[in-house]
Amino acid sequence: MISVTKLLFADNYFGDSLRYTKDAHLMTNGAAQGVGPVVVWNSTRTCNLKCRHCYMNSDSRKYRDELTTDEAKRFIDDLAEFKVPVLLFSGGEPLIRPDFFELAAHAAAKNVRPTLSTNGTLITRDVAREIKAIGVGYVGISLDGLRSVNDKFRGMEGAFNLAMAGIENCVAVGQRVGLRFTINRHNFTELDKIFDFIEAERINRVCFYHLVYSGRGSQMLDEDVTPAESRQAMDTIIRRAKDFARRGLAVEILTVDNHCDGVYMYLKALADGDDATAAQIRKFIGMNGGNRSGIAFGEVDPLGYVHPDQFTQHITFGNVREKKFADIWTDTSHPILAGLKNRKPLLKGRCARCKFLDNCNGNFRTRAEAVTGDFWASDPSCYLTDAEIGL
């Protein structure tokens, strides 16, 4: 996760304390000194939508053997013991779980900050009030464009209107809320409209995700943006972030799942002759160290299995029904988990020879494997040229 606002303006938001601290890049089992990793829990696979790029292959049917309420509470207790700073409730659609509020409140009581990733369609005004009351730190609502584009991707006509109502209800009760937007060839030209939308709706935060070829998203490889389109998208994000800052609009802006974004921002600042900003960006991306799946970020699926991240569920390290999360996360007997914690010697191709490897850490392994069949090959979504990375 790259904080555009942190890199450009040195702004401070909650997650920056986990991403941009002096020794963050040296950690092997957590996000920063003294804390465990951020954990996303796909608490259910059931969903009321059927999104084209869903990494969980979710739909509206009921799935068997998902963690019970008591099992989930024990899991949360284990996370608290490991000093996990954030638990992201995801799905499917996590609000479909009837015990969501009970479990989120339990996490908050244990000093594990609950956050919510949702399609927003189930957030009524009363739901928004309860989300805020139990201490959910942030609600991320997924949109993939404005009305017609979003509904096409979400597989339901009217999904945009329902998500809009969810956003409005969060804003109305003072709940911190943001957008989650997955960039692809069909919607990257809508980025300016998305920024206009963020401003009009008084949204606090936006995360621009790069497509990962996992689940139903693996069928969209030919619909991903080209390197030139990635650069165009980043140029728009940088331009609008600067515009917001110039006009005093406090919106946290991030990109996710492609750490060459930070390097691109650094190179662009250099090319623009803004040496001070370039130095600031280089400092922060050096502190962060790039992709930290298997280190500072992990995922637990609805059945309790532990994975490097939510897009890499074909690789499993253990189950929280059988062992504590901390014991699984620190056990390097699995070669992939051991490799992720010290991946530089294993990387191949452009990644292995890139002069910015310490700032990117080989980017996203699941994309590399999806395209090449080799988990340690170069990430095909790196849009930097050979000349830019020193080849």
Image: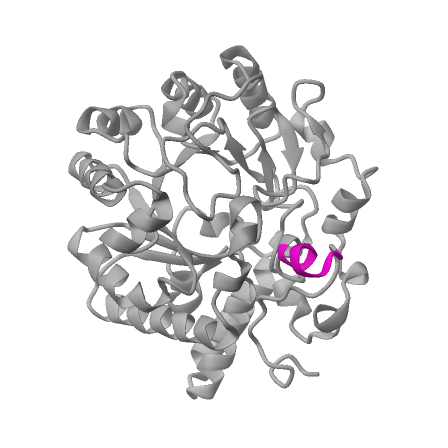
Q: From the viewer's perspective, is 312 left or right of 229?
A: right
Image coordinates for residue 267, horizontal then vertical, percent: 51, 80
How many marks on residues? 0
Image coordinates for residue 238, horizontal then vertical, percent: 37, 71
When the figure is inspected, residue 345 is found, relative to residue 62, above or below; the finding is below
Image coordinates for residue 86, horizontal then vertical, percent: 49, 36
Q: Which residue is drawn at 57% across and 48% down?
A: 214
Q: From the viewer's perspective, is 69 left or right of 321?
A: left
Q: Residue lying at the far top in this picture: please name it.
A: 70
Q: Which residue is drawn at 26% across and 42% down?
A: 157
When the figure is inspected, residue 297 is found, relative to residue 229, above or below; the finding is above
For the rendered model, the colour scheme is one colour
Q: Residue at x 38, y 75 (%)?
A: 235
Image coordinates for residue 55, horizontal then vertical, percent: 52, 43
Q: Could one spot residue 35 in this view of the protein?
A: no
- For the record, the magenta segment spans 367-374
